[in-house]
Amino acid sequence: MKLNELASTLTIAQITGSGDITITGLQTDSRKVAPGDLFICLPGHTVDGHDYAAQAADQGAAALVVERQLNIDLPQVIVKDSRYAMAVMADAFFGSPSTHMKMIGVTGTNGKTTTTYLIEKMMNDHGVNTGLIGTIQMRYGGRTFPMSGTTPEALELQRSLDDMSANGVQCCVMEVSSHALEQGRVKGTDFRTAIFTNLTQDHLDYHKTMEDYKAAKGLFFSRLGNKFAHQRNQRKYAVLNADDEATEYFAKMTAAEVITYGLAHNADVRASEISITAQGTHFHVDTFLGSTDIQLSMVGKFNVYNALAAITAGLLEGLELESIKKSLESVPGVDGRVESVNEGQPFAVIVDYAHTPDGLENVLKTVKEFAKGRVITVFGCGGDRDRTKRPIMGKLAAKYSDVVMVTSDNPRTENPDLILKDIEAGLLEDSVPQEKYQLIVDRREAIQKAIEMASPDDVVLIAGKGHETYQILGHTKHDFDDRVVAKEAIRGMNK
Ligand SMILES: CC(=O)N[C@H]1[C@@H](OP(=O)(O)OP(=O)(O)OC[C@H]2O[C@@H](n3ccc(=O)[nH]c3=O)[C@H](O)[C@@H]2O)O[C@H](CO)[C@@H](O)[C@@H]1O[C@H](C)C(=O)N[C@@H](C)C(=O)N[C@H](CCC(=O)O)C(=O)O
Ligand SMILES: Nc1ncnc2c1ncn2[C@@H]1O[C@H](COP(=O)(O)OP(=O)(O)OP(=O)(O)O)[C@@H](O)[C@H]1O
Ligand SMILES: N[C@H](CCC[C@H](N)C(=O)O)C(=O)O
Ligand SMILES: [Mg+2]
């Protein structure tokens, strides 16, 4: 594509140098620039992409997108906002791939990954070639790709959607994080359905207040559905959790058709008669297209909500309720979400990704429902992330557990001991007795001790890292998998 043509997609842009050159790719990271690329300089949170334009030029960049003219001998497109320009140009360069498939997005503090997995399963079972993008991985057409975060940057996203489209993908279900909404990573992506799971405390390091966090999530719904489609299969939908306070706010700001789910009597898709055992979760569901009973292998009342969100999305895509039921019932579980570790030990070991106060409380409530013995919880809080959730999570862990092992969970650039102290502040505030908890900075040691102290019928819950296969210390990722470490500890115990 010619630079002139790409630049013409922007309203306010000035080109210096020749616009009559061919752009073969777009890139925002100087380290990855290939000859012929257009290098887009993004002012970041840590460094400024403009400072890497010279490196991009050395690597063969054909032109630059900048917010201020640089002293570099390359054609430059000067724009007001390079992030916005990136989103527009990426959409143009890849031919608006999101309009070639059904886009279903899921936002909310917890439950995004789980809900997207459920939707992916039911759509694929129904014969709709479906791609998935989220925290654990991106996958489509039988291939999987690692992810460095939950929601890719606009450029990466459009590139991926283009490849999906080229590989016959008809529907893409993706997680949309609040960071992504705030940074405009999904600007230009044409969603058909936007799902909201729930809003509880997290990410206050980034969003500062719950109001700001809610407003960031709101961007997903305010950008949806301003043009009504009279054919139902073209309509935009906001699928909202009827039991969450933030729903009223999101419902007001969207022009899309609002469909609700939950336990509330007025929800459009409503669950009742919920019963949970260690083997799974049963519930009855009434929808605008019939009723049925569903038996999930996944445990936890929160998974009823994830299933309801998925059922709603499935019905809106024209799936039969019975086909949805069959798919949901065949999902064994999601990687690292309430995942059992079994090495023949006489107690339960569960690995879960709960890393927010609400997530931890939910999983602990679930565990308590079927634990016959004590609950021993191993958990920590991420470094360079919301500090205010640490004492709250400490209190919740102590409230629902008999023993708490406070340990490290990706300390990143923070001092791990100080993170543990932040968690302990909550325990001290609640006068939790010293013998009920231990601070063990080494996660392997914490897991080993928890497993060594477990008696028959106890449950050891290892929370926070779920599917993760690393521990981030400083800027380095070290191999670490809670499931592998727990298995080793159990085998060690039997020797
Ligand atoms: C706070 C945040 O979201 N930061 C994201 C942001 O980084 P940044 O603004 O700091 O970028 P930067 O490092 O300053 O770099 C600025 C520009 O210079 C470029 N650069 C930089 C160095 C270099 O040598 N050459 C070069 O060209 C970079 O490619 C970039 O274009 O843009 C980067 C590139 O897209 C992201 O990788 C980075 O995510 C960081 C790693 C991160 O940890 N993000 C988390 C908080 C996040 O987004 N999480 C959510 C999930 C949250 C949830 O659980 O709901 C997610 O969607 O992943
Ligand atoms: N609907 C829900 N409500 C509350 N907690 C939930 C819900 N679904 C899952 N959880 C808890 O949150 C954890 C993370 O679930 P999941 O990975 O589906 O959420 P997520 O929103 O994708 O998280 P992330 O923001 O890190 O990507 C689970 O391990 C479970 O403990
Ligand atoms: N998407 C979340 C994941 C948190 C997982 C936890 N293990 C941590 O590292 O804090 C984040 O980046 O905040
Ligand atoms: Mg996720």
Image (spheres, grey):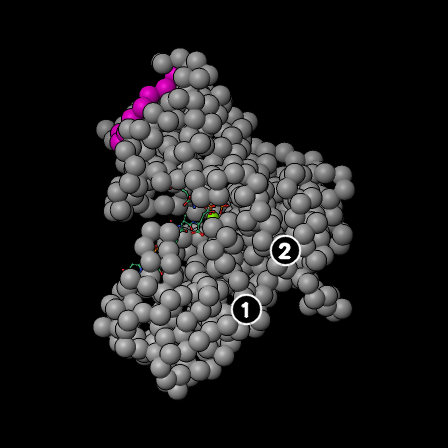
- Spot occupied by residue 96 in the image (x, y as percentages of width and height): 53, 73
- The CB of the residue at mark 1 lies under 8 Å from ligand 1: no
Pick the residue in front: 275 or 1.
1
**Residue 132 — which label?**
none
> Which residue lies under the disc numbered 1?
98
Q: Is residue 209 visible?
A: yes
Residue occupying the point 32% across, 55% down = 47
Ligand 3 found in image quarter: top left
Outermost residue toward the bottom in this view: 20
Task: Find out whether residue 353 is within the magenta segment.
Answer: no
Q: Are marks 2 and 1 in contact (CB under 8 Å)?
A: no
Pick the residue in front: 46 or 160.
46
Q: Tell me the quadrant of the picture where the N terminus can be found.
A: bottom left
Pick the residue in front: 419 or 61.
61
* Residue 433, image quadrant: top left
Q: Secondary structure at mark 2?
A: helix
Against 343, is 17 above or below?
Answer: below
- Spot occupied by residue 112 in the image (x, y as percentages of width and height): 52, 48
Nearer the observer: mark 2 or 1; the answer is: 2
- Crowding near pointer 1: few (<14 within 10 Å), some, many (20+)? many
Against 449, is 184 above or below?
Answer: below
Residue occupying the point 42% across, 37% down = 386
Whole-number angstrom distance, CA of label 2 to CA of label 1: 18 Å
Q: Tell me: 142 left or right of 329.
A: left
Residue occupying the point 26% across, 46% down = 475
Query: Which region is colored magenta?
Result: 436-448
> Which residue lies under the disc numbered 2?
222
* Residue 254, image quadrant: bottom right
